[in-house]
Amino acid sequence: MHWTLIFILLLLTACQPQQSTTPRAAKKPAVHLVETAVVTAQPLTTSAVYTGTLRAQRIVRIFTQESGRITLFPYYPSDTVKRGTILVQLDDALLKAELDKTLAVHKQNRVNVQRLQKLAKRKLVSADELLRAETEQAIARAEERILRTRLSYTQIKAPFTALVTARLVEPGDVIDTNTPLLTLIDPASLVIDVAVSEWLLSQLKLKHRVSVRIDALGSQTFKGQISRLHPTINPQTRLGQIEITLRPYPKGVREGQFCRVTIQTHLSKRIAVPYSALRRDQEGEYVFKIEEIEGDDKQVQRQTVRSGRRLADRIEILSGLKSGQVIVIKGFLGLLAGKMVEAVN
């Protein structure tokens, strides 16, 4: 039995694993995979779509300056009239008769003055009589000018090449002075009124190019430029007004049509990062900044920042970052400050 116990002890000793004499290697901490980006300052471009309405800058409402019966009025809304075209003709028979009478009186007075001037040289008439005759001649001349002016008012011509938008009377109507007859617009003076934010207004200048789409004309875009920047801002809405001119005017444009205006602005160089890089919590805004430690190892640290305007998929950083720094833009799940990371861009 003694020998049996010794045999069992030897067998157990042989079955135990031998301890390694070399020390076990230290386990390397887990590395978090992230996508990174280098912070740079670059010119930024903003693009936004604003809505507006086509409006004619040049609108003329035609009124009468003389009373009478309308004898000619051939134009209707949507008709185009060239400059100098006769739009309205009033009955002028009575004024022409009065003008003929005045011309006859004027002629008689002129002859009478010439006769008295010859007699005055021979001292056969008094100076008062000659002065009275000259006054009568001047009155007749003034009456002639008045009647010619009134006669010109019986014929109304188009002041510019225009589009008729309203017809308010008909031939045969007897009208008084200052009666509205029709309305004209200059189709070449169409502009688009657009309301923009006060911030954008400060970035714009005259002749700034924009693109315009008019819903009624389909998906085609047209070239335009800013022709006027209004000097005031609405204190309730904080919006300013701009006017945009189309050059050339596309066919089919009409006053009142709905427009979509795309405005692009270029800002000076700003630090901006992908919007996905910006984090927020109770302490404020921050990003994860990558710092190199021993060798090629990298770890992330929390960097507090202050953001500005969002420009499409990027956001402006006003403070907290400098050009050349590397930040994390993807891979935030489980990411904490001080963690080892590896970039997998």
Image: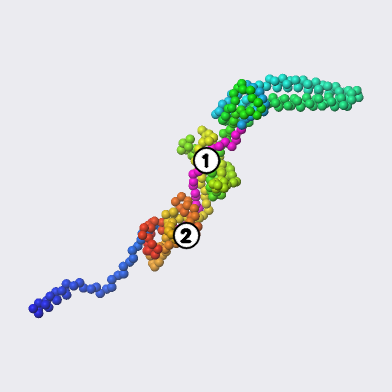
Residue 265 is one of the magenta-drawn residues: no
**SS for callout 1:** strand
The region drawn magenta spans 38-60
Type of amino acid at the residue the image marks with label 2: Val
Foreground residue among 19 and 60: 60
24 sits left or right of 309 in the view:
left
Type of amino acid at the residue the image marks with label 1: Gly
298 sits left or right of 55 in the view:
left
249 up-or-down from 319: above or below: above
10 up-or-down from 333: above or below: below
Q: What mark, if any, has residue 52 been given in the picture?
A: 1
Q: What mark, if any, has residue 143 been given in the picture?
A: none
In percent of the image, x 60 and y 25: which residue is there? Answer: 169
Q: Position of residue 180 (x, y in %)?
A: 62, 29
Figure quadrant of the N terminus = bottom left
237 up-or-down from 306: above or below: above
**What is the magenta segment's predominant secondary structure?**
strand
Q: What mark, if any, has residue 305 been given in the picture?
A: 2
